Image (cartoon, rainbow, N blue to C red):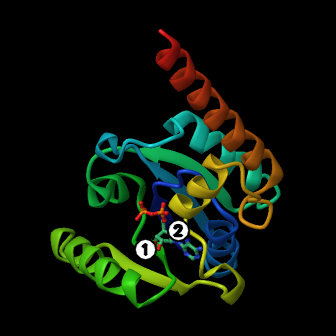
Amino acid sequence: MRKAVYPGSFDPMTFGHLDIIKRAAQNFDEVTVSVLNNKIKNPLFSVEERVKILEKATKDLPNVKVDSFSGLLIDYAAEHGFHVSVRGLRAITDFEYELQIAQTNSKLSHGNLDTVFFTAGLEYSYLSSSGVKEIACFGGDVSECVPDFVADMLYEKYNQKHKGETDEQQN
Ligand code: ADP
């Protein structure tokens, strides 16, 4: 059975991520999308929220599972029998960073974890989680970037934040 892992921050998942998930699912028997619990990145959504978003968005994809992990990807992959890590490439700017991670993982795992890249769909290559957050933060339209339920969650987060800031300013 060809099992792959698609690790990432997914803060939050965008249509670009979903496109990669669907295409990976067509190429592997099973794909586990796994949210990296990386406290250094100071994410907007908790790991639990990000997992829930991914579960809801992939509920109709029978060979896609959702999980989370912390620590080194190679350790997580060895534990679960993943020999392939899926990543997405949008532009040349992604390439340098992704190549370095892929080679590091290959070296650290003694060749047991390979990386397979899917190139971003043309209509999604401009999309990034940070871009989507910036648009949503100012109340912009993110309907072409994320599913509606994710857009609602984004606006809710930023409303809460704005409310918190306003309350703080008043005190
Ligand atoms: P990271 O894991 O580096 O924190 P993300 O969670 O945003 O970043 O992305 C996980 C993976 O998905 C990365 O390989 C990234 O290049 C890829 N990716 C992000 N956005 C898109 C997109 N719009 N189209 C294709 N791939 C994407």
In the rendered view, would you say 74 is above or below 138?
Answer: below
138 or 4, nearer to the observer:
138
Crowding at mark 1 (Cα within 10 Å: few <14, some 14-19, many 20+): some
153 or 131, nearer to the observer:
131
Task: Report x, y in % for residue 90.
Answer: 51, 83
Task: Report x, y in % for residue 114.
Answer: 35, 79
Instruction: Report which residue position mark 2 lands on.
Output: 3
Quadrant location of the N terminus in the rendered image:
bottom right
- Residue 47 is left or right of residue 92, and the answer is right
Q: Residue at x 26, y 54 (%)?
A: 72
Mark 2, secondary structure of its residue: strand
Instruction: Report which residue position mark 1 lands on.
Output: 84
Q: Which amino acid, by three-letter code, is at mark 2?
A: Lys
Q: Residue at x 27, y 73 (%)?
A: 101
Mark 1, secondary structure of its residue: strand
Crowding at mark 2 (Cα within 10 Å: few <14, some 14-19, many 20+): some
Quadrant of res 156: top right
